[in-house]
């Protein structure tokens, strides 16, 4: 019996992997560069569109390889222009990506896992069962799908790895995705415009520091004492605030770069003036900035956001300590696209 092989998906393949495929087809490896540019830069979706390749090669590619985009289920559009994309990556497994148009630039927020094992008290994603890590192809697939929908491709593009999942728990695939995103021959996003956000996986931060291509680092700190952080961000029981901040102080920062600390403000948990003073002391002496994120409330969370007055008071204390602290206003809250609300909901 003749068994037909399933075609291999090339979305998420590195240039070296494509060269390997071309060698397998007994074709010169320079063709791999054309294919790499075709997939990632020109965003071609079928082999017929590769008119710069001969018919014979296209035929061979057609037989063995696919350019498999993600199955896009729904797009939700917010009053503020934010778009939330729902993809089904395996039967019943849904993930999301968000496109946030701003005045001068567009931001993509992409997911790295189906679910998350960290289980932060204030995060809807953390309430989901953890299914699996996403592959590089599934992460690049999110970027390409959103790229196809941008109104103006010449605007600056930022990518934040802040969707569903803990990126440093999917280290290898996330780093491969970053290498493909930053390659000038492909999507060509500068690493300065990519931010990876982590709940504090200290060995992952140390490893990231040794990479040839390093994105901006954001740390979801969210508390100023171990007792509170143990409760809010359970990974703190493994790597506490002191160990986390030591890894941050040792993290190599290119010129003019800073580490961002995200601080979700939750009423009665971490929002007092003492917290603000303690936060300033913890962050003393290295290049950083703070994003204050008033909690996005959800029926699945029994927590509240502080009053506007306490949010402003908290910010004021940080500024008095010479810390750049911005309040991040939610985008796309009406379509459940805001931070911490991504749960694959339709
Ligand atoms: N797992 C990574 C990245 C995804 S979470 C991390 O934790 O950093 C992205 C950001 O959303 C984090 O800074 C997190 O603290 C924040 N967040 C989670 N739930 C939130 C909520 N309900 N309201 C506001 N921000 C939230
Ligand atoms: Fe996971 Fe980040 Fe949500 Fe915590 S905040 S549960 S680490 S996705």
Image (spheres, grey):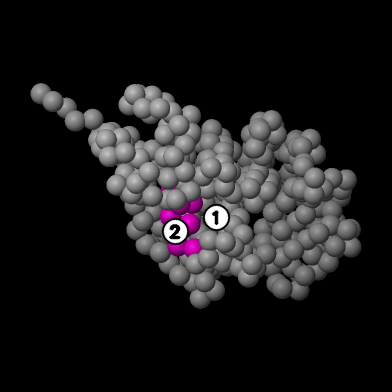
Q: Pointers 1 and 2 in contact (CB under 8 A)?
A: no
The C terminus: image quadrant: bottom left
* Residue 264 relative to residue 135: left or right: right
Our reading of the magenta stretch's main secondary structure is helix
- Residue 226 in the magenta stretch? The answer is no
Q: Which residue is mark 1?
A: 109
Residue at left offset 48%, top offset 57%: 147
x, y percentage for residue 112? Answer: 50, 45
Q: Secondary structure at mark 2?
A: loop
Q: Can you tell me whether the CB of the residue at mark 2 lies under 8 Å from the nearest atom of ligand 1?
A: no
* Residue 244 relative to residue 56: left or right: right
x, y percentage for residue 182? Answer: 58, 43
Of residue 67 and residue 235, the one placed in the foreground of this image is 67
How far, Cα to Cα, is label 1 from label 2? Answer: 15 Å
Residue at left offset 61%, top offset 68%: 102
Q: Which residue is mark 2?
A: 148
The N terminus: image quadrant: top left
The span picked out in magenta is: 138-150
Q: Secondary structure at mark 1?
A: strand
Q: Earlier in the sequence, mark 1 or mark 2?
A: 1
Of residue 155 and residue 83, the one placed in the foreground of this image is 155
Q: Is residue 80 above or below residue 182?
A: below
Q: Is residue 78 above or below residue 226?
A: below
Front label number (1 vs 2): 2
Pointer 2 local density, CA inside 10 Å: few below 14, some 14–19, many at least 20: few
């Amino acid at each position: 019996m003749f068994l037909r092989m399933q075609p291999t998906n090339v979305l998420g393949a590195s240039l070296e992997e494509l060269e390997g495929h071309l060698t397998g087809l007994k074709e010169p490896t320079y063709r791999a560069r054309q294919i790499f540019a075709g997939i990632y830069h020109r965003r071609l979706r079928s082999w017929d569109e590769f008119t710069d390749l001969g018919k014979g090669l296209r035929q061979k590619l057609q037989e063995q390889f696919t350019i498999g985009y993600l199955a896009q289920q729904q797009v939700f559009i917010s009053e503020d222009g934010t778009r939330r994309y729902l993809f089904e990556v395996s039967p019943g497994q849904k993930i999301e990506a968000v496109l946030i148009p701003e005045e001068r630039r567009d931001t993509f927020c992409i997911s790295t896992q189906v679910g998350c094992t960290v289980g932060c008290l204030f995060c809807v994603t953390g309430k989901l069962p953890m299914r699996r890590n996403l592959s590089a192809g599934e992460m690049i697939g999110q970027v390409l799908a959103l790229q196809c929908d941008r109104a103006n491709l010449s605007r600056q593009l930022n990518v934040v790895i802040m969707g569903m999942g803990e990126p440093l728990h999917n280290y290898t695939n996330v780093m491969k995705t970053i290498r493909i995103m930053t390659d000038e021959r492909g999507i060509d996003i500068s690493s300065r415009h990519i931010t990876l956000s982590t709940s504090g996986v200290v060995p992952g931060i140390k490893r990231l520091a040794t990479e040839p291509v390093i994105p901006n680092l954001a740390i979801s700190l969210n508390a100023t004492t171990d007792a509170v952080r143990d409760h809010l961000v359970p990974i703190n029981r493994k790597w506490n605030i002191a160990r986390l901040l030591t890894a941050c102080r040792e993290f190599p920062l290119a010129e003019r770069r800073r580490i961002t600390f995200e601080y979700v403000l939750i009423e009665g948990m971490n929002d007092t003036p003492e917290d603000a003073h303690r936060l300033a002391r913890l962050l003393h002496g290295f290049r950083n900035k703070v994003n204050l994120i008033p909690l996005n409330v959800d029926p699945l969370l029994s927590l509240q956001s502080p009053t506007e007055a306490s949010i402003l008071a908290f910010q004021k204390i940080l500024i008095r300590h010479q810390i750049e602290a911005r309040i991040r206003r939610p985008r796309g809250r009406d379509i459940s696209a805001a931070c911490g609300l991504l749960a694959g909901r339709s």
